Image (cartoon, helix red, strand yellow):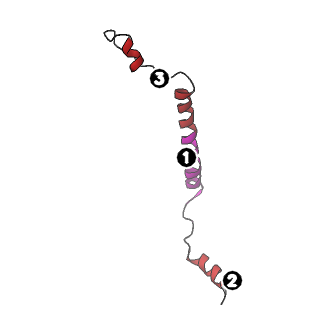
Amino acid sequence: MGIETILPLLKLLSPGRDDDAVDRMNYHYTPNVLLALSVLISFKQFGGNPIECVMPAKVPGSWEQVV
């Protein structure tokens, strides 16, 4: 009884697939779409113009550089 006879028996112990094509597409494509959208949003912040804060009129202009 060598390793050649034990390995096929281990395949019988592994659980079968209980998902369908929609489930597989969901866990394959959803992380990629989320990653692509987060990169797109991050590029707008770090690559383009940063978010500008609206300061009230009573705040002096020197504070705009700090915030």
Instruction: Compare marks 3 and 1 and give the one earlier in the sequence.
Output: 1
User: Which residue in the protein does label 1 denote?
Assistant: 31
Residue 58 placement (x, y as % from top left): 31, 9
User: Which residue in the protein does label 2 denote?
Assistant: 4
Farthest-out residue, right: 4
Report which quarter residue 3 is drawn in. Answer: bottom right
Q: CA distance from mark 1 to mark 2?
A: 38 Å
When the figure is inspected, residue 20 is found, relative to residue 37, above or below; the finding is: below
Q: Which disc, if any, is residue 1?
A: none
Which contiguous range is marked in magenta?
Answer: 16-35
Residue 67 placement (x, y as % from top left): 39, 21
Q: Give the residue drawn at x 56%, y 23%.
A: 48
Q: Give the residue drawn at x 61%, y 76%.
A: 11
User: Which residue in the protein does label 3 denote?
Assistant: 51
Can you say which quadrant of the picture contains the N terminus?
A: bottom right
Instruction: Compare marks 3 and 2 and give the one earlier in the sequence.
Output: 2
Main SS of the magenta segment? Answer: helix
Q: Check if residue 67 falls in the magenta segment.
A: no
When the figure is inspected, residue 59 is found, relative to residue 36, above or below; the finding is: above
Relative placement, left or right, of 34 versus 52 is: right
In depth, the one of 30 and 21 nearer the eye is 30
